[in-house]
Image (cartoon, rainbow, N blue to C red):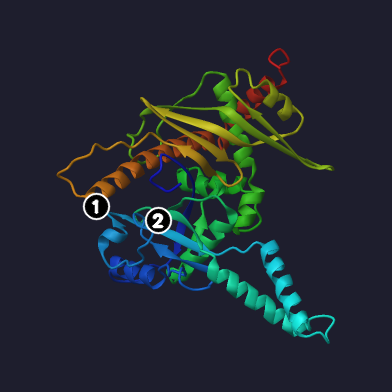
Amino acid sequence: MGILSNTISICQFRVAGDFPAGDLFQWASQRLAGNGFKSIDQGTAELSVGWVHLDDHRQSDFAAPGAFWRDHYLVFTLRRDQRRLPAALVKAYQQVAEHEYLAENPGLSRVPKQKKEDMKEAVRGMLLAKTLPIPSTWDAVWDTRTGLVTFASLSPAIIELFEGQFKKTFDGLRLVAVHPYARAEQVVTEELKPALAQANQAGSDAALDLIRSNQWLGWDFFLWVMFRTMHDTSEYRITCGGHGEMNEPFAAYVNDRLVLLSSGENGQQKITVAGPQDHFSEVRTALQNGKRITEATLYLEKEEHTWRVTLKGELFHFASLRAPAVRLEKDDSVDEHSEKEAVFFERMFVLEQGLQLFDSLYFIFLELRLGSGWEEESARIGKWLAESDAL
């Protein structure tokens, strides 16, 4: 599902490095075109990776502003075409080729090693020429005001491919994942940053260390939201900048699906609790037995609009993020390109508004978690978990 879909899975990055001096459009246009996708339909190549237009995955020419420029956004799509040959198919044709070779050379009892390798390459070439490449695409939106890049995939392999292609394309720049600790640095006030730094359990600034050593951020966040959900305290106020006005009310709560995990001598144990939750009884029992909430379905509501997302606690990836539907009425007086741009801007508006609500919720949690009030809140949560009448 692309960035324009009403339901999408996304992760975010911050762009690090020095931007080149001069015209940003000209630079980006040249870099994207220089690393544009090249078709392999007419050949036998197994793989091709490059950039294409968001609105037309057949086009990789980025000379015109409309191809990738949307006000303060740069938008482009990563395309990968790949030919895949089933191992069983290659093996079957290889055996046929070997049998024919031995029939032509009755003095040999087996095919020589080098000949067998040559046959294998010939068989693969013949099959690749008959196999159409399978295209896959993933959208990216780069907000040049904030330096944030939103990428429409949560697959580790595809994310790695995207990071490598981005670094190759934009010399001197790289992507830094917005994981829970990085997001905390992004949303907290200057007054809270010393407390956040003190709570940091990582021994280095390496992203992997910051993620693994600060999993407590996701664990405590989920536990806090679940506790607040259960006690009908799901009303909050916008605290982070964005499309919504500061101090506007919104609601946030967890429901439907939670995933809990524990690690022990017998390895990791995973529990998935699905369906509407009245008292979170099964979840509370698992928490009492030492498990941690690592994933949950989170709802964000503002006025009549609802955002539903499966939040991955370790990385703060947003899976199956369903935002309010974008419905623009057809206007015969407006050209197709303008209509597509209007859909894009409306889509980004609702997507960013949902992320603004999430960041506000996260800030409210962090303000409590890093402040003097957490000890009292933690005691209330512990007492609630220990209550046997609700289990």
Mark 1 vs mark 2: give the one in front. 1
Left or right: 87 as drawn, with respect to 170: right
Q: Amino acid at mark 1?
A: His
User: Which residue is at 35% across, 34% downward?
Assistant: 246
**Closest to the observer, 252 or 382:** 252
Vertical order, 102 against 10 (above or below):
below
Residue at 61% from the left image edge and 52% from the top image edge: 210
Callout 1 crowding tier (Cα within 10 Å): few <14, some 14–19, many ≥20:
few
Question: Is 370 placed left or right of 7 in the picture?
Answer: right
Question: What residue is shown with label 1?
Answer: 337
The one of 170 and 22 positioned closer to us in this rendering? 170
**Is 229 displayed left or right of 303 in the figure?**
right
Residue 384: x and y, percent? 66, 20
Q: Are marks 1 and 2 in contact (CB under 8 Å)?
A: no
What element does badge 1 sit on?
helix
**Mark 2 sits on what residue?**
147
Which type of secondary structure does the marked residue at label 2 adopt?
loop
Whether residue 46 is visible here, answered yes or no, is no
- Mark 1 or mark 2, earlier in chain: 2
10 Å neighbourhood of mark 2: few (<14), some, or many (≥20)? few
Quadrant of the frame with the C terminus: top right
Res 206 seen here = yes
